[in-house]
Image (cartoon, grey):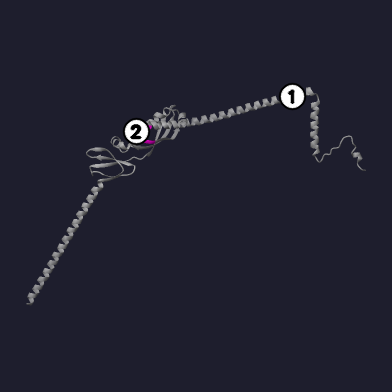
Amino acid sequence: MRMRSEVDISCVVRRVRWRSQISKGTEVSVMAKLFESIGKLGIALAVGGGVVNSALFNVDAGHRAVIFDRFRGVQDTVVGEGTHFIIPWVQKPIIFDCRSRPRNVPVITGSKDLQNVNITLRILFRPVSSQLPRIFTSIGEDYDERVLPSITTEVLKAVVARFDAGELITQREHVSRQVSEDLTERASTFGLILDDVSLTHLTFGKEFTEAVEMKQVAQQEAERARFIVEKAEQQKQAAIISAEGDSQAALLIANSLMAAGDGLVELRKLEAAEDIVFQLSRSRNVTYLPSGQGTLLQLPQ
């Protein structure tokens, strides 16, 4: 009986162990299936998010977009600001900045009198929104690099050749306005708008600058010489007028002497004596003694 009971106990233990192993294996398989499902769900979400993200694009303020379709080419529709949908892989957005942007274009050209002129032109430009598909198709995204330097050089050389060096300085406003009108008309053929065109730098060659400085120095010296001549002429006129005045005064005096005799001379003597007496009377060291009186003889003994 004892051996039978021991056999029964060992069988029960084996069954318990087998059942525990089966339960553990089942739990592991369930967990594996659960993780596999979660992984598949994550991959599906990632793929879906990537597809949704690739189907959306943003157009910032002041920008416009042109859609390139792999099957139909560049679309004629211009996309405005905001978030928009596209077909992934099939369509691609090309973003353009439609705000005014500055650009400096330096040009070396010649004037009407064959003087070298260094000019720098500052331009504020922007594309026409409705013509962006044509600009992208015919010129490209770097349209400003391809168009502005060439047309600016062409227009500047044509306008500057109409004026000589002096007119470029004295009529700078007229030159700038003429350049602006011609360049605006030329840029419109490429679908560009020029908001402002101005000449920021205008210089000439070294030889011309030295010649202008020498001319200015010569003009200043000529002005100084003319002033000296005019001053001498004025001094001459003043001397002549003074001599004529003295002559007229002597003539008047002579006529007076002839008309009044010695009366004028006596009058001048009296005036001179009166003046001498007045001056002597104010001096403390001088005493006036009347004539014809023995004043010193009447002093007490």
Residue 34 at x, y percent in the picture:
18, 58
- Report the magenta residues as a range: 183-195
Residue 184 at x, y percent in the picture:
37, 33
Write the residue at 24% across / 42% down.
91
Type of the residue with mark 2: Ser
Residue 249 at x, y percent in the picture:
73, 25
Compare residues 110 and 39 and report the one nearer the observer. 39
Q: Which mark is residue 252?
A: 1
Q: Is residue 213 left or right of residue 288?
A: left
Write the residue at 80% across / 27% down.
265
Residue sitting at the far bottom: 1
Q: Which residue is the site of mark 2?
A: 188
Q: Look at the numbered discs 1 and 2 and tell me whether their residues touch, using CB distance below 8 Å.
A: no
Q: Is residue 261 magenta?
A: no
SS at badge 2: helix
Q: Is residue 193 magenta?
A: yes
**Mark 1 to mark 2: distance in Å?**
89 Å
Instruction: Point out the image quarter for the N terminus.
Output: bottom left
Q: Is residue 42 left or right of residue 277?
A: left
